[in-house]
Image: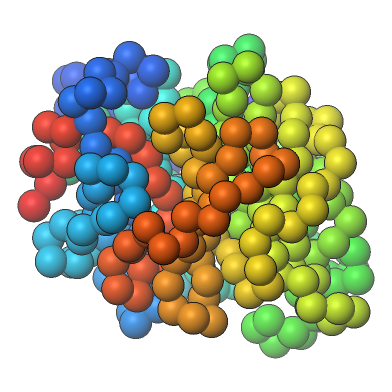
Amino acid sequence: MVETTRRTLLGGLGATFGYAALPAFAQDKSDSVFLLSYFTDQDEGRDGLKLARSEDGFVFTPLGGGRGFLKPQVGQDKLMRDPHISQGPDGLWHLLWTSDWFGPVIGHATSPDLVHWSAQQTIPVMFGFRGVRNSWAPEMIYDPRTREFIIFWSSSIDGRYGATPGERFDGLKLRPYFTRTRDFRRFTPTRLLFDPGTDSIDFTMLRLENGRYQLIYKDETHDTERRRWLVTRTAASPTGPFGPVSKPFTVSMTEGSTAIRLGERYIVYYDIYEQGHFGAASTTDFVHWQDETRRVRFPDKARHGTVVRVPRAFADAIA
């Protein structure tokens, strides 16, 4: 592994707090609720981490009147877009986010209880590449076989996959990249996760009951034809190999998916961004889908985030 040259966690992985939450697999689901992390375009993510809770996984009520609970302090733009919350095997919660519209870094912080947060960390995920335009929508998943966290995101590199130099969004051709870490201080060299064969963004991953993994993402193709819909692939591990791409299970102009298991079904939430609201679809096999959009209520103006199950006491303590 290579040592990061940017700012690292000052407090360690929760050491300053003296305790950690129960890991997700050990939580009593009868005494838990669902928590949504999100941002809004009204402030471009500058207001920081926003949170909402739900009893049933469908109707989410904003906490704190919709205020930001953690202000972004890292990155050139100091944004907190696409906030992704997940829990490590030690019970510590990790937050990853897009810290800049365009740049080679992402943001990271930890919390034992989703109230008290560590110092924010800049992770230089794309420092090893020339012509990097962006580092968007980072997420992570823990691999129990290697005992590592897999962090993945989307980037466009000039000269690769048809990407060309340009201003802001011009010339972008996005692909998923990843790095591994055990301590969020040392990171393996960044590598391509796989080539989907299309311009693709907003990758999220689920570990299924059978131990396999489900990757869900947006096919961003819009130059040769208009797609911009969600598709999925299966995998034996978080880094592949990945199976064939599915048929789209959403209409065009959808993105920013997050997924959970809800009862006997998996539910995928997604941003229908041109219409200004979220939708959802549920499945048992990632082949046959049931539209759940009419049941979903996210906070007004909510954008790309993550839904997770948390202890009720944690959500009650967030004010």
x%, y% of residue 67?
A: 18, 66
Q: Is residue 136 left or right of residue 40?
A: right
Q: Nearer the viewer, residue 27 or 137?
A: 27
What residue appears at the point 21 percent right and 58 percent down from the top-left corner? 61
Classify residue 87 by image quadrant. Answer: top left
Q: Nearer the viewer, residue 151 or 141?
A: 141
Is 180 drawn above or below residue 120 in the view shown? above
Q: Is residue 113 left or right of residue 303?
A: left
| Residue 171 visible within the image | yes
Image quarter where the N terminus lies is top right
x%, y% of residue 14?
A: 27, 28
x%, y% of residue 180?
A: 63, 31
What residue appears at the point 24 percent right and 37 percent down from the top-left corner? 33
What residue appears at the point 54 percent right and 56 percent down from the top-left corner? 291
Q: Nearer the viewer, residue 37 or 5?
A: 37
x%, y% of residue 172?
A: 76, 74
